[in-house]
Image (cartoon, grey):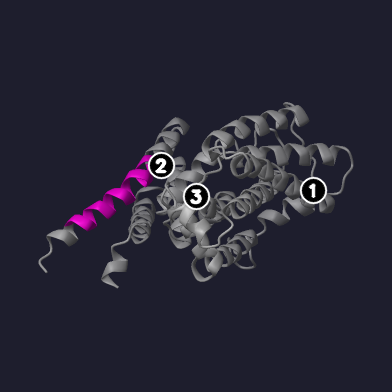
Amino acid sequence: MPKRLGTWDVLVVVVLAAVVVASSVLVDGFATSRFWGFLLLDVIPVALIALPMTLVIITGEIDLSVASVLGLSSAVMGQLWLSGTPLPLILPLVVLLGAVCGAVNGLFVTGFGLPSLAVTIGTLALYRGLSYVVLGDRAVADFPFSWTGAFIEPLPGTTVPWVAVVVLGLAVVFGVVLHATPIGRALFAMGNNDQAATFSGISVARTKFRLFVLTGAIAALAGFFWTMRYASARADNGGGLELAVVAAVLLGGVSIFGGRGTLAGVLAGVLLLITLRNALQLADVPADTLTVVTGTLLIISVVGPNAATMLRERLRRRRPA
């Protein structure tokens, strides 16, 4: 138990609690159920994309195109709606589109052996450009309220959006797969050593390809939610969201080099990042400062866990036998 209390994800939970307490005292309107309802709506797309992103980064890869896939799915969604396609059909179509975008990433990474960082930086620009080709600078905002209102509808008697419960359920599924199944052990093995994982019988290329497909599909699903929440399909939807997702995952203790991390820590990282940003927004902090805060947290999330591990090792070595 003492060893567990010294881990990075527990530290993130402690910092999250401190931010909540301090903001409740210092920021007017923070400690209201209405504010927390809006905060959870902001958490949903970041947490949703962070789930598969966690698996990808644990294997030693990364996908920076997720926000552009979100924007492309939103743009295609708007164009399909203008053409008369019903929303129940649009939803599976945009998820399929996201899966195809993820498959393109996976093909270049696992099929041609290219680094995922370079590939997804390229597709980040490609998919965002395609979203402007599809919809241009237009905004499609005549979606029926029966859909837009349903996606932000709270649970009866609360301000908690029902979609947040769905995302929490998905998080439980991802957590079980990652931490309690052979699939999860294989992902950690790939992150620690690709060659050793291959020699042990793990299909590294196939597994990573499927992870990229899954990430693309869920990013597109997040795009559908984004469009419904704001009742507006735009090519620039989700711009910059990839920074928040990666920052939250790394802040939650997932190693950028792969092979280490917990899903509980990632969820705590998502809540910490979004809570801090929303508290600063409520305190009328400029948007540029919010970007600086996100970047600072990203640096801390990369340096912090490694520094903490080195410090624990030094203390362990100095401890008398």
Could you tell whether 147 is left or right of 160 in the image? Answer: right
Q: Are there few (<14), some (14-19), or many (20+) residues within 10 Å of tag 3?
A: many
Say whether marks 2 and 3 touch (CB < 8 Å): no
Question: Nearer the N terminus, badge 2 or badge 1?
Answer: 1
Residue lying at 81% horizontally and 48% vertically, measured from the top left: 90
Q: Which residue is mark 2?
A: 298
Query: Can residue 232 be seen from the camera position used here?
Result: no
> Amino acid under label 3?
Ile
> Amino acid under label 1?
Leu
Q: Nearer the viewer, residue 99 or 113?
A: 113
Mark 2 vs mark 1, CA separation in Å: 34 Å
Q: Are there few (<14), some (14-19), or many (20+) residues within 10 Å of tag 1?
A: some
Residue 115 position in % (x across, y down): 53, 38
Is label 3 in a helix, a strand or a loop? helix
Q: Which residues are magenta?
A: 297-314
Q: Please identify, in this view, whether the residue under mark 2 or under mark 3 is nearer the observer.
A: 3
Q: Which mark is residue 146?
A: none
Mark 2 vs mark 3, CA separation in Å: 14 Å
Is label 2 in a helix, a strand or a loop? helix
Query: Can residue 93 be seen from the camera position used here?
Result: yes
Question: Nearer the N terminus, badge 2 or badge 3?
Answer: 3
Q: Does the magenta segment cover residue 123?
A: no
Residue 13 position in % (x across, y down): 37, 59
Q: Which residue is mark 3?
A: 57
Q: Nearer the viewer, residue 77 or 279?
A: 77
Q: Quadrant of residue 77?
A: top right
Q: Which mark is residue 93?
A: 1
**Count of marks placed on residues:** 3
